[in-house]
Image (cartoon, rainbow, N blue to C red):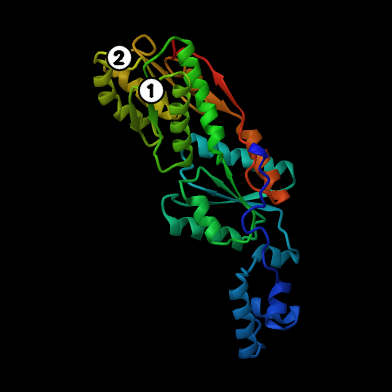
Amino acid sequence: MHGGQNHKAEGMRRPTIKDVAERAKVSLKTVSRVINDHPHIRPETRERVEVAMAELGYRVNNAARALGTATTRTIGVLASDSDLFGPAAGIAALEAAARATGRWISTAYADGADTDAVVAAAEHLLVQGVDGIVVVAPHAGTREQLAAAKLGVPLVSLHGDASGQSAAIALAVDHLVEQGHRRIAQLSGPGAWVEAAARAGGVVAALARHGLELAGVWEGDWSARSGAALAAPIADVLRTPDAPTAIVAGNDQMALGLIAGLDALGIRVPEDVSVTGFDDNPDAAYYRPALTTVRLDVAGEARRCIEALTAGVSDPEAAEARLIVRASTA
């Protein structure tokens, strides 16, 4: 496991129908009848079973109940902002990784900034009988909220390793320094996102390693639209003395928007300023100029997430990263 960690996943043991029967001091058959809303159950017996279920945090597992087994070989995926390339690619990779092990995924979507929506989505997955949950592109605090909810299944995060994200974006900073840049700014993703905070911190740490400080910082929302909207204030800074000569963007989409916006204002990339991205989305090679970016091994990390869930541990190894050098840096 990454960093030598091998933690048991949060709330790994899920209470079973047998636990409920023992707590309520009734038979397994009686618990089953209560769960299936059998009409011929004495009210006091039903109440005793329901109290035991509540005390244990037992949730009715519809899929496992139908199959008569304790496992469904289904992995839950809790995702937000799936219209962005990173989360969408992560979900696709998880589906492929699960299928390769004879499992399936069930996906629920929620606004990661809405605690109630996140917990409700997780509860929805539990009703489907998932054997574990992968959180894709979580906001800061989402993992803690889910752990506090005591879901009773293993829980891991795709791209949840901050040090891996920091080390990955440092490749872009190192490349720019090697190219002779000393005044490097960054266009970060939204600060509420784990990945955005990790990448932003990685830029600062990498610069410090070279004895440099940030030459400017702007925050977008991951979209190309936000990168384009920030082009005007960034262009104003680029026209000043001691302006940044390079900008590290937190993802490819923001870099795309920024490059287009700067071009419309007469600022050329890379002649006037170099720009790097992150993700290496399928279109990055076809930007004008083609985008220098960082590529994560999303498929590899997805496999490690599935393996971690099936082994009942958390904190899978971070994805490996590669710098893809193209025409947007000079």
Q: Position of residue 216 (x, y in %)?
A: 33, 25
Marks 2 and 1 sit apart, C-alpha to C-alpha, by 24 Å
Whether residue 32 can be seen here:
no
- Asked whether 266 or 184 is in front, the reply is 184
Given contact means CB atoms under 8 Å apart, are the residues at marks 2 and 1 in contact?
A: no
Q: Residues within 10 Å of mark 2 (few under 14, many from 20)?
A: some
Q: Position of residue 88 (x, y in %)?
A: 53, 39
- Asked whether 276 or 80 is in front, the reply is 276
Task: Give the amino acid at mark 1.
Answer: Glu
Q: Position of residue 246 (x, y in %)?
A: 38, 17
- Residue drawn at x 72%, y 78% is 22
Q: In the picture provided, is 100 more to the left or to the right than 89?
A: right
> Is the C terminus in the top left, top right, bottom left or bottom right quadrant?
top left
Q: Name the residue beneath numbered marker 1.
A: 213
Sequence-wise first label, 2 or 1: 1
Q: Which circle, 2 or 1, is nearer the viewer? A: 1
Q: Position of residue 135 (x, y in %)?
A: 55, 47
- Where on the picture, by quarter, is residue 301? top right
Q: Which mark is residue 44?
A: none
55 up-or-down from 64: above or below: below
Helix, strand or loop status at disc 1: loop
Q: Which mark is residue 267?
A: 2
Q: Residues within 10 Å of mark 1 (few under 14, many from 20)?
A: some
35 up-or-down from 167: above or below: below
Looking at the image, the residue that sits furthest to the front is 211
- Residue drawn at x 26%, y 20% is 237
Helix, strand or loop status at disc 2: loop
Q: In the picture provided, is 91 more to the left or to the right than 242?
A: right
178 up-or-down from 156: above or below: above
